[in-house]
Image (cartoon, rainbow, N blue to C red):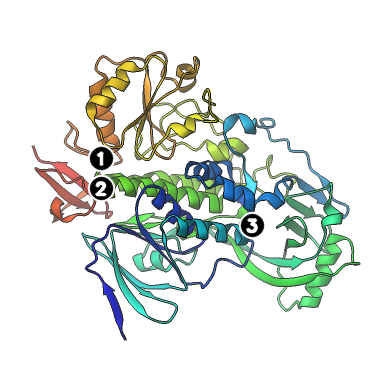
Amino acid sequence: MMYNVHSGDRQRRVLIVGGGLVGLCASLFLSHQGVPSILAERRPATSPQPKARRISIRTMELFRQIGIDGPVTKAAAALADFQRMSVGPTMAQAEPLPFRPPGGNPDWAGCSPVAACLCAQDLLEPVLRDLAAERGGDIRFGTEVLDTGQDADGVTATLRGPGGELTRIRADYLIGADGPRSPVRERLGIARSGRGALHRVASVYFRADLSDLVRGREFNLCQIENPAAPGTFASINGTDRWIFTTAPCPGRGPDEWRSITKAAIGRHDFHLSIDSVQEWELGQLVADRLSQGRIFLAGDAAHVMPPFAALGANTGIQDVHNLAWKLALVMGGRAGLELLDSYHAERHPAAWFAARQSLARTPNLREMQTTSADGTPLADPLALTLGFQYLAGAVIGDGSTADIHHLDLCGQPGTRLPHRWLPGRHRSTLDLAGRGMTLIIGTDGKAWADAAAALSEPGLGVGQVDLAAWGAAVGTGNGGALLARPDQVVAWRHRGPAADPSAELSMALGRLLSQPTAAGYCCLPPAPPALDESVRVASAGLVGGGGQAGSTRLICRDSHLCTRHDQ
């Protein structure tokens, strides 16, 4: 067997395993941060199945940040008017349901500069693939990752290309976005926890021109309450592509599936062709660890959940955005290796929140927003997509917490920056967040701006909000400031003016970026984990920067890296 060996190639890069929505977004987010990547996907092409369709407001905000919200919105144009839920004995008789969440109808336009959209996965993935390649990603479909290994300096992987050729490559880090049966996760031996498999369903992907039937009655989902043909229709393009999800029936042939689907539609005088019938399993599982050394899990490799809250793909896309900027700062030498520990500290609770909320939501469209299936309190729809708060990780908390019963974004560390339109051009306060940390001040923040300039911190930006009510809205008051991360999350805030802005800002950046502090430790979360003193590696041998003279790197028992500064 012949190998093309590139193990000596020391180009800084990240290997992405998996070319679905999450893997392609990982490539795009890394390119935005200036980090080269190689994406390997064993399938020869993008998904032929519609699968995920709902692109949440939060995901669209991240797409807007890297300038791809336009192409995504264009791909989603066919379903722009298909937002409602309908219920009836057949599709022909279905009526729209009123949208009445417990807290009242949300102010969608007031909370974000973008809107959610519906775009079938088989339409979105080709758009993302083309964009990823245009922006410099090395995108390799028809390429399988056969094995992976890691050491103190990087990751080694063997790739089998479309022609069977084998290539061994080196990368600094690896992102496993290779689906629910992730070989990357299995090779690491990482277990999963949760409710496991729940029940099986069948999805009938069919084609039939129903545009006249649904015109003026457009829907996203249509629940069929009919004992002879129960299930739910999902719009794929609003004209001739649809999915009917119902109970599986082993042995049922194409003619029988065609007949039951027409019965659920409520008409038989049209041509209907079935592309595929797929049986799949609803489940809830979250990996016990989202990282091990230089390898990270994201998307379905890290968490699977029922689709009732439309959080699965969105949670995965937000995983890789969280990871991309951290990898960029570490690989660029602007942050210590410990920053990467915050990926698990932040995204593991976020995955569990999404998984629990998904499990709590009943598939019954009449009760989805009002009734908990298992007693778990249901988050407000806006809080569900925008209101999660990181309580540990690359944040410096101040004791404030966000409520899940309504969207509660008022500058609490760990929450997304509140959206306000800025004067002049069509810009949001979210646009102030750059590729590194950004100090955000009000009209009375000159002392903070001077402190930032004096620090000469690489990548530190300064954004000013010239809105009279800004200080009150984010809890900084007059003369205060906050730091926003590249993912538009508040990392730290200072209420009111500081006696020594330079010292306060320097201390905050040191803690957030895992740089040396007066306390002598820079491990995230703040309390250092148990250390195995028998395992040590020299800081000079670790890629990514952050090694300081007079420091010792210790490998913790949970495979995290921690730095102790010898005094």
- From where the camera sits, is residue 349 visible? yes
Q: Quadrant of residue 345?
A: top left
Per the rendering, the mark at residue 120 is: 3
- What is the quadrant of the C terminus in the image? top left
Amino acid type, callout 1: Ser
Q: Secondary structure at mark 2?
A: helix
In the image shown, does 558 or 137 lie closer to the viewer?
137
Q: Nearer the viewer, mark 2 or mark 3?
A: 3
Per the model, the C-alpha gap separating discs 2 and 3 is: 37 Å
Residue 452 horizontal/vertical position (percent): 28, 26
In the image shown, does 82 or 408 lie closer to the viewer?
82
In the image shown, does 497 or 134 lie closer to the viewer?
134
Per the rendering, the mark at residue 337 is: 2
Q: Quadrant of residue 510?
A: top left
First-in-chain label (3 vs 1):
3
Q: Residue at x 17, y 46 (%)?
A: 547
Residue 44 horizontal/vertical position (percent): 51, 73
Crowding around mark 3 (Cα neighbors within 10 Å: few <14, some 14 to 19, many 20+) is many
- What is the quadrant of the N terminus in the image? bottom left
